[in-house]
Amino acid sequence: MIRLSRLSDYGIVLMTRLAREPARALPASVLAQESALSPAMTGKILKLLARADLLVSQRGVHGGYALARAPERITIAEIIEALDGPIALTSCLRPTAEGCGIESVCPARTNWQRINQAIRDALAGVTLAEMASPPRNFGPAPSASPRRAAAPARDPAGLVITSLGAK
């Protein structure tokens, strides 16, 4: 199973919350409460994101954390890399890897590099603005039907008659 770390998952949650009001700075305590995260975990993530220049922190009464740039200009790949380092599906793909012991004879390394790049490109192709927007419908609407609904029946007095039962 390929999974994001908890740090990246929560970081994307926090960044998505900030992207819904990009002009507003929110205190860490508010972000922690709204995201149901511990204050310590929230603080750690926010500091890492600020260090990566994805967030800016503002002191004072109206202070807090805000996006460093427009949500359309921040990618999910940037958030993950800020929190977890370079995206690498296997240890041999990490830039600082010392090798896995079979690197010199590994028949899969080249294909792992291709797969890793495809996943990184996919994550870089999704912006924070897209994550903050309502989900898109990827297929036909569940209630969509190709046939037209029949006109409602009317009784002699002109009242509309509807049926709550199955057709």
Image (cartoon, rainbow, N blue to C red):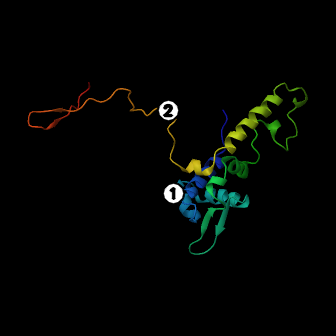
**First in sequence: mark 2 vs mark 1:** 1
Say left or right for 18 vs 51.
Answer: left
Does 64 sit above or below residue 163?
A: below
Q: Amino acid at mark 2?
A: Gly
- Name the foreground residue: 74 vs 50: 74
Q: Residue at image x 81%, y 26%?
A: 108
Q: How many marks?
A: 2
- Residue 71 rendering spot, x and y as whole percentages: 62, 55
- Residue 61 rendering spot, x and y as whole percentages: 56, 75
In this figure, which residue is indicated by the disc labeled 1? Answer: 34
Q: Amino acid at mark 1?
A: Glu
- Residue 145 rendering spot, x and y as whole percentages: 38, 28
Q: Nearer the viewer, mark 2 or mark 1?
A: 2
Say what secondary structure mark 1 lies in.
helix
Residue 41, quarter of picture = bottom right
Crowding at dot 2, Cα within 10 Å, few <14 / some 14-19 / many 20+, comes out as few
Does 105 sit above or below residue 50?
A: above
Q: Residue at image x 54%, y 60%?
A: 21
Say left or right for 159 vs 52.
Answer: left
Say left or right for 90 vs 103.
Answer: left
In this figure, which residue is indicated by the disc labeled 2? Answer: 139
Q: Residue at image x 68%, y 39%?
A: 122
Q: Which part of the image, by quadrant, shows the C terminus?
A: top left
- Name the foreground residue: 124 vs 8: 124
Q: CA distance from mark 2 to mark 1?
A: 31 Å
- Residue 111 rendering spot, x and y as whole percentages: 79, 29
Residue 157, quarter of picture = top left
Residue farthest to the bottom? 60
